Image: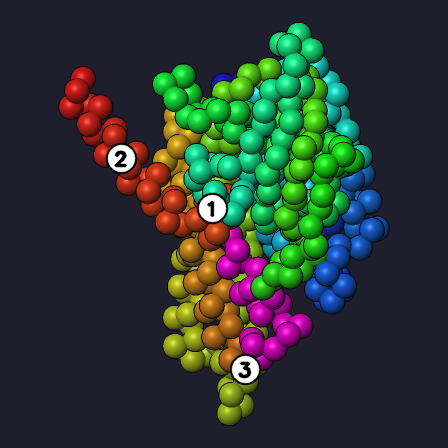
Amino acid sequence: MSPANVSDDDFREILAQTRHFVRTAVVPREAEILAEDKVPDDLRDQAKKMGLFGYAIPQEWGGLGLDIAQDVELAMELGYTSLALRSMFGTNNGIAGQVLVGFGTDDQKARWLEPIASGEVVASFALTEPGAGSNPSGLKTKAVADGPEKDRAWVINGRKQYITNAPVADLFIVFARTRPADADGPGIAVFLVPANTPGVEIGVKDAKMGQEGAWTSDVNFTDVRVGHDTLIGGSVDIGYRAAMTSLARGRIHIAALAVGSAQRALDESVAYAATATQGGTPIGNFQLVQAMLADQQTGVLAGRALVRDAAQKWLHDEDRRIAPSVAKLFCTEMAGKVADLAVQVHGGAGYMRGVPVERIYREVRLLRLYEGTSEIQRLIIGGGLVKEAQRKLRD
């Protein structure tokens, strides 16, 4: 484990500034974000100035250099408001940026990481396809080599779906199959494809259930020609491992985000229960309402502890497979339950547009789907435990 780039004292200041920004600048404008389906430009500019577009990018490449344990503390603050805020810079720091950090060549890092960290470039993770979501082995997008090895180019054809930040992306991290899976590997490579490359077509912005202001769309690649220097890591077999590693790390981050959203739903519920009356009595005085608040609080505290534990296991390289899936499964399911209880505590008011818990209820539903569905997490956890037991028997 390498030492953290950011000291505890410095991180406390970063966390305090982020919390202040979220609570005083973003929370009051949640209705505007919802109505306009857009994070206001001035909030985006503030996030850039604070370094949020590169908080998880190493300092040597222009980022703040937060490690995963610090990342989750920040994510719990970011989850407290409209998830569109975090989505603006989530791919830069997470699933897209981490592919470059972990697997890019020095030249690729030098070319792209600094503008990604500053927010000058928005990077987008182009993995999901129709028929290939949580399991990348089903990829149909193809990259075909063209020309002699020294001057080789690659021609990419395929369609990607539900790609976060695609409508505003400057760079796509594109996963494509270079050959069928064989004994040498899965045959999946990953390429750096600037959005303005001929043959790249961005689809219409998706209309989603929630997360207004967090934009996704299809991306089509038709005879997209890129140089050999765009092949991440210079290897045609890095793609699958890069995707799995980036997604596993991202699962801990999403779990932390879910805890932040659940904390907000709990806070809204407690405030409402303490002030709203039924028959002249605050509803928080009723034991059945107190029971709902108790279940919410229990879920939030359990989730927070689990996220922190999973982050430490990742940091110390103790568990980078099962623990991230456990955290993601529990925390995203927990956030759904807490949000549902929040609507129940609010009664009819909780079903009204413009009430924070109504937005939260819709927003957190997506957390159980992306970066691996809850069902995929269960397969990773259960399968991993069985494999560990079988390995011990063989040893």
Residues in magenta, as a range: 349-367
Label for residue 385?
Answer: 2
Q: Position of residue 107 (x, y in %)?
A: 70, 14
Q: Is residue 112 visible?
A: yes
| Residue position marked by numbered label 1 in the rendering | 131
Residue topped by disc 3: 348
Which amino acid type corresponds to the residue marked 3 in the rendered image? Answer: Gly
Q: What residue is at 39 percent from the left and 32 percent from the top?
A: 321
**N-terminal-most mark, 1 or 2:** 1
- Image quadrant holding the C terminus, namely top left
Residue located farthest toward the left when viewing the structure as drawn: 393
Q: Quadrant of residue 205?
A: bottom right
The answer to whether any part of residue 78 appears in the image is no
Q: Amino acid at mark 2?
A: Leu
Q: Are marks 3 and 1 in contact (CB under 8 Å)?
A: no
Find out whether residue 366 is within the magenta segment. Answer: yes
| Pointers 3 and 2 in contact (C-beta within 8 Å) | no
Observer-nearest of 264 and 238: 238
Q: Residues within 10 Å of mark 2 (few under 14, many from 20)?
A: few
Q: Classify 293 as above or below 113.
A: below
Q: Is residue 53 left or right of residue 236?
A: right
Q: Is residue 189 above or below residue 356?
A: above
Q: Main secondary structure of the magenta part?
A: helix
Q: Position of residue 158 (x, y in %)?
A: 59, 38
